[in-house]
């Protein structure tokens, strides 16, 4: 009987620890691999370096220009900016811009692994977003370098800078 009670306490403590660790500040949610939702014209204006792009003649080119950034971050706090960045009539993120905002991040990726938000913190108006990639075993995990887009929806806060860190 004591062993059963002890096991139940251990399970309860583990449950509380796990659920407590998954609480992300500012009600933040990560939307992974949103490439299909990005407006094509906006995407063409926001290229990044060291990824492959296909032009209209189906010729693959790679961008190695140091004047082009390696990643880009956008803060979306209103419907007008949202409509400029995303395809028409997309309500995928269900953002209430009165109380919420989106942070859009685009970067060079070499796989299509699922990403999970692990932490978000604010210090001196500088927001740090930490995420991890779900590890995959086996072959076929790597792809041609491409421009990947993710979004983080969170409560509206005042920020001056943002950094994304993969853990």
Image: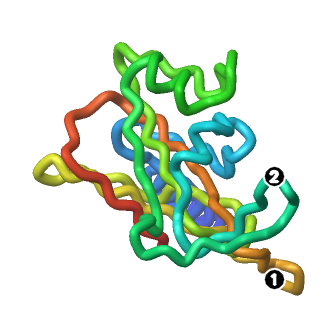
Q: In which quarter of the image is residue 57?
A: bottom right
With 160 as the anchor, is 30 left or right in this view? right
With 85 as the anchor, is 121 left or right in this view? left
Q: Residue at x 76, y 75 (%)?
A: 144
Extreme front residue here?
Answer: 57
Residue 129: tell me if it is visible.
Answer: yes
The residue carrying pointer 2 sits among few (fewer than 14), some (14 to 19) or many (20 or more) residues within 10 Å by Cα, namely few
Indicate which disc residue 57 carries.
none
Q: Where is residue 24 in the image (x, y as percent from the top left)?
A: 42, 47
> Circles 2 and 1: CB distance less than 8 Å?
no
The mark nearer the N terminus, 2 or 1, is: 2
Q: Of tags 2 and 1, which is closer to the observer?
A: 2
Residue 69 drawn above or below residue 160: below
> Helix or strand or loop: what does disc 1 sit on?
loop
Q: Residue at x 68, y 20 (%)?
A: 88
Q: Where is residue 28 in the image (x, y as percent from the top left)?
A: 44, 40
Q: Distance between the residues labelled 2 and 1?
A: 35 Å
Q: Position of residue 35 (x, y in %)?
A: 69, 47
Extreme left residue here?
Answer: 124
Write down the residue under mark 1: 137
Query: Which one is in front, 7 or 79?
Result: 79
Residue 104 drawn above or below residue 5: above
Q: Residue at x 69, y 36 (%)?
A: 37
Query: Which one is in front, 79 or 119?
Result: 79
With 25 as the anchor, is 20 left or right in this view? right
Write down the residue under mark 2: 56
Viewport quadrant of the N terminus:
bottom right
- Check the image and tell me how it is coloured: rainbow
Q: Which residue is drawn at 88% across and 85% down?
A: 139
Query: Which one is in front, 27 or 11?
Result: 27
Residue 99 drawn above or below residue 86: above
């Amino acid at each position: 009987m004591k062993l059963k009670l002890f096991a139940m306490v251990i399970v309860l403590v583990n449950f509380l620890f796990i659920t407590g660790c998954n609480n992300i500040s500012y009600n933040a949610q990560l939307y992974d691999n949103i490439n299909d939702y990005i407006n094509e014209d906006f995407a063409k204006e926001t290229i990044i370096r060291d990824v492959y792009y296909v032009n209209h003649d189906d010729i693959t080119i790679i961008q190695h220009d140091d004047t082009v950034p390696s990643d880009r971050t956008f803060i979306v706090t209103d419907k007008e900016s949202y409509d400029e960045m995303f395809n028409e009539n997309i309500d995928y993120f269900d953002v209430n811009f009165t109380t919420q905002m989106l942070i859009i991040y685009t970067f060079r990726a070499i796989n299509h692994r699922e990403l999970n938000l692990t932490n978000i913190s604010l210090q001196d108006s500088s927001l740090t977003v930490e995420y991890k990639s779900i590890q995959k075993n086996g072959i076929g995990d790597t792809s041609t370098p491409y421009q990947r887009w993710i979004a983080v929806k969170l409560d509206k806060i005042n920020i001056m800078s943002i950094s994304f860190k993969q853990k």
